[in-house]
Amino acid sequence: MSSRNTNIEELLSATIEAMGYEIWGVDYTIFKSRVNLCVYIDSDKGITVDDCAEVSNQIEGVLDVEAQFPQNMTLQVSSPGLDRILFKPRQFASRVGTLIDVRLSWPVEGRTHVRGRLNSCNADSFLVEMDEQEFEIRFEQVRRARVVPEFN
């Protein structure tokens, strides 16, 4: 996770947790002159549209007072969804055994994209099995990782 995302998450986590939700992750992107901040929330009971609206209203105030964000920023609050982005090592650890899709910042064994079964995870890296080959990926190499929903 980038330091900007970490700072935003730290700024918002107390407010979100006080409301009874977990902050799953933060995705701050700039494309052309558009700035988008997406805050993913979760809870044991799931997330509704009303939950997202309530959190959005609360954190807008925090962002207005505490942070210096551009006027053209769009704020989104969302559940992580079935194809959730994995932001933190503990999120990878809780998904061992599932199918994941990983985009890499630099190649692992010549690949910048790995899609396979998450076999194990430790504090620094995780193992993904793809085509009967296992790839060790360090967390700092991950550009984006998502769970791939499986329907049987």
Image: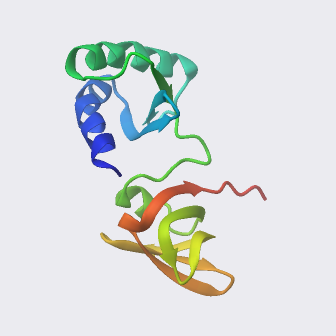
Q: Which residue is drawn at 34% across and 27% down?
A: 20
Quadrant of the image occupied by residue 134? bottom right
Which quadrant would the C terminus be assigned to in this image? bottom right
- Residue 32, percent from left and from top: 53, 33
**Apparent side of residue 127 relative to residue 100 in the rendered image (left or right):** left
Residue 49 in the image: above or below residue 9: above
Q: Which residue lies furthest to the right in this view?
A: 152
Q: Which residue is drawn at 49% across and 28% down?
A: 33
- Residue 15, percent from left and from top: 27, 24
Regarding residue 146, the answer to whether it shows in the image is: yes
Regarding residue 44, the answer to whether it shows in the image is: no
Residue 44 in the image: above or below residue 84: above
Total labels: the figure holds: 0
Residue 126 in the image: above or below residue 83: below
Work out whether residue 138 or residue 93 is closer to the camera in this orientation and state it: 138
Q: Which residue lies furthest to the bottom in this view?
A: 133
Q: Which residue lies furthest to the left in this view?
A: 66
- Residue 120, percent from left and from top: 45, 75
